[in-house]
Image: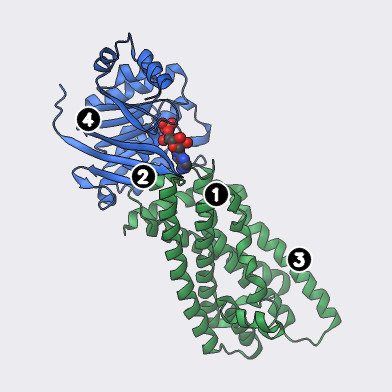
Chain colours: A green, B blue
Amino acid sequence: MKAHRIWALVSRHLYLYKRSLPRLMEVFYWPLLDLLLWGFITIYLKGYKENLPGYVTFFIGALILWDILFRSQSGISVSFLEEVWSRNLLNLFVSPLRVSEFLISTMLISIFKVIAISVVSAILALIFYSFNILSIGISLLPLVINLLIMGWAIGIVTTALILRYGQQAEILAWGLAFLFQPVSAVFYPVDVLPGFLKVIARYIPSSHVFEGMRSVIKDGRLPVNELVWAFGLNLVYLVSSIIFFNWIFKIVKIKGSLVKIGE
Amino acid sequence: MLVMDNVVVEVRDLTKVFNGVKAVDNISFDIYEGEILGLLGPNGAGKTTIIQMLLDVITPTSGRIKVFGKNLAKHREEILSRVNFSSAYVSMPHSLTISENMRFFARLYGVRGFEKKIDDLLVSFGIEGEKDRLTRTLSSGMMSRLYLAKSLLNDPRILFLDEPTASLDPDIADKTRRMLKEIRERSGLTILYTSHNMKEMEELSDRIIFINKGHLVAEGSPRDIIERFKEDDLEEVFLKIARGGS
Ligand SMILES: Nc1ncnc2c1ncn2[C@@H]1O[C@H](COP(=O)(O)OP(=O)(O)O)[C@@H](O)[C@H]1O
Ligand SMILES: [Mg+2]
């Protein structure tokens, strides 16, 4: 493992973002729209049920946290797609670059993206709804880290599928995370899910994160067991996703399609 | 001038099957240090597949590849850090400037003190004045010079070039060939390149490997091959082989 190769890839994306308006838009535009839309809806609903405690907080907190998962995932797959779009993949893999170094660099880039987007969202939420995400307190950190890791796992699987199936799988870069949204219990407790989905939700790290978040907002306490579940599952999924990626990479080298992606 | 004794690449019984079709069929050859070896053959002959197996981005179905005397798959990292590649079919991040791209690849190859190296390369390819220009705004001539500059960043001992002149107009293609010759004179670099341009092959190659439908059909200096097939030039040989099967 060589740090200079990881840094090479990270720097390449920093150069890219430095002057690309559409890419920077991604950081500011979507969080703004999301927050406006959902913020107004919750304010409207609050007018109906005034005594619903912490409703706005639940919603906006959930919104910001979900975005962390989504951006972490898309951060990985979009970094890969940038290489496909600029027909640069072959340049990377005829160099001594290792698959593991490539994956780590995409994770670092996703951290940058997530930090940028979260800061923007948090500031907007404070301005528009006087919602201070930091009021969740120090418990916020393990929740965020878990969402980040789950995003990596989904992002790595997505990237492997694009690697294998080419452009027809590109849509997954924006869609796959949402497959997990209903069972992540983002905006409602796991309790409202029907029986079999409740079972599935137990094995989705993000459901434990969002249960944890609600618990923190409601009574200021983060249940340790939710955290342990989230970390444990994430570890299993992240390792599995990396194994999956390596396996697909081998297949792609046999099929000779590494160079043909994007053609 | 050329001492043909030091083998840098050794290919034995190399075969690649794609979906039951043999793209490369039991090919063996050596590449000697300091030579320009041309891989010549019609479209679909298997040239790209061979080059990509030599760079470990395609896994052979069977056969053996040694580079610098070492098994390629086992010593991938070490070997790939001492070779480089360019092709008309790859590109570079187009939203980066020339110097950003060069720094990116320099870091990727772990080049020490790369700012000086980059400056020198850009000067020698005559694009130092453009270094802050976005890559997407370059003319195809400048682009091909940038690709060559990139492929020399790590002082490679072997350069693999897959149709380096394919998308260039005749004038720029000619300049590129001259640059390649110059680089070889200057640094004693070994070059393997593919083309289906016969004139280019005659002009540039010390030795040619002629392949058709995955088979090696002839090997030798351009003159040897022309004489062996009793033709006037390589083009005639090419047509004879390509039309007559292998
Ligand atoms: N990834 C692949 N999957 C299936 N067939 C392939 C693949 N790559 C190349 N081929 C086939 O292998 C043969 C050799 O291709 P290639 O090496 O690209 O030839 P050349 O570079 O000489 O034009 C062709 O018939 C081509 O269609
Ligand atoms: Mg080819």
Give the residue at mark 1: A166
Say if disc 1 is inside 8 Å of ligand 1. Answer: no
**Distance Cα–Cα, label 1 vs label 3:** 34 Å
The vertical placement of B4 against A245, above or below, is above
Q: Earlier in the sequence, mark 2 or mark 3?
A: 3
Q: Are marks 4 and 1 in contact (CB under 8 Å)?
A: no
Q: Secondary structure at mark 2?
A: loop
Which quadrant holds residue B230? top left
**Could you tell me the amino acid type at mark 4?**
Ser
Q: Earlier in the sequence, mark 1 or mark 3?
A: 3
Q: Position of residue B115 (x, y in %)?
A: 32, 42
| Residue nearer the viewer, A99 or A30 | A99
Give the residue at mark 2: A94
Whether residue A134 sits left or right of residue A249 in the image: it is right
Q: Are marks 4 and 1 on the same chain?
A: no
Give the residue at mark 4: B187
**Distance Cα–Cα, label 2 vs label 3:** 46 Å
**Distance Cα–Cα, label 3 vs label 4:** 63 Å
